[in-house]
Image (cartoon, rainbow, N blue to C red):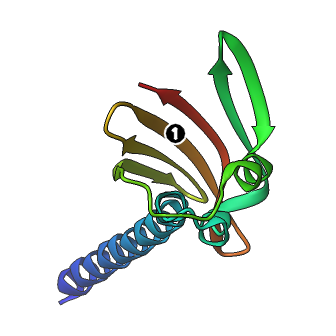
Amino acid sequence: MRKSIVILLVLLNITGITFAQESEYKQVAQTVSYYLDGGTNKDFNTLKKAFHKNATMKFIKKGAYVEVNALEFFKKRMKPGAKQNRKTHISYINITGNVASAKLEIDYENFGFIDYMNLIKIDNEWKIVSKIFYRK
C-alpha cells in the first residue's frame, strides 16, 4: 500500500510539472505570436504586447553592428496598411525556469528573416527582452 501511494505521488508530481510546462509553452507562444501577428497585420498595438519597454534589437546592417530599442524601431517603421504577404513559423521554444528563447521564421516571396527572441517572465507575463535576426 505504501509503495502504491509513493508511486501515485510521483505520477501526480510529474503530471503537474508536465501541465505547468505546457502552460508556460502556450504563454511564450502567445507572446511571440503577438509579435508575428502584429507584424503581419501591420498592427503596432498587437506587436507591442510582445515586448518589454526596454527590449533591444541587434543586427548587422551594411557590415556594421546596430543596437536599437525594439519598440522605438517598430513604431517608426510600422505604418498601417494592407496585411503583409508572408508566412510565419515558430521553429522552437525553449524554456528554463523564468527565461525562454524562441526561433521564428518569417518568409516573404523573395527573402526572409530568422529571428531569435529571448524572453523573461516578468510579473507573471512573458516579454521579449532582446531580439537578434538574420535576413536571408
Q: Secondary structure at mark 1?
A: strand
- Residue at screen point 42% across, 45% down: 104
Q: Is residue 127 left or right of residue 3?
A: right
User: 3 or 13: which is nearer to us?
Assistant: 13
Residue 11 location in percent, x, y?
A: 25, 77
Q: Is residue 97 above or below residue 68?
A: below
Give the farthest residue toward the bottom.
1
Residue 79 location in percent, x, y?
A: 65, 58
Residue 111 location in percent, x, y?
A: 38, 31
- Residue at screen point 75% across, 46% down: 73
User: 92 or 24: which is nearer to us?
Assistant: 92
Residue 132 location in percent, x, y?
A: 60, 34
Q: Is residue 95 above or below residue 135?
A: below
Within 10 Å of disc 1 (Cα), the crowding (few <14, some 14-19, many 20+) is: many
Q: In this figure, what is the number of numbered marks?
A: 1
Give the farthest residue toward the top.
63
Residue assigned mark 1: 116
In the rendered image, which quarter is residue 22 located in? bottom left
User: Where does the C terminus fall, quadrant-wise?
Assistant: top left
- Residue at screen point 45% across, 35% down: 113
User: 119 or 3: which is nearer to us?
Assistant: 119
Q: Look at label 1 and name its amino acid.
A: Tyr
User: Where does the N terminus fall, quadrant-wise?
Assistant: bottom left
In the rendered image, which quarter is residue 131 located in? top right
Q: Is residue 110 left or right of residue 62?
A: left
User: 118 or 89: which is nearer to us?
Assistant: 89
Q: Is residue 105 left or right of residue 52?
A: left
In the rendered image, which quarter is residue 105 located in? top left
- Residue at screen point 30% across, 77% down: 15
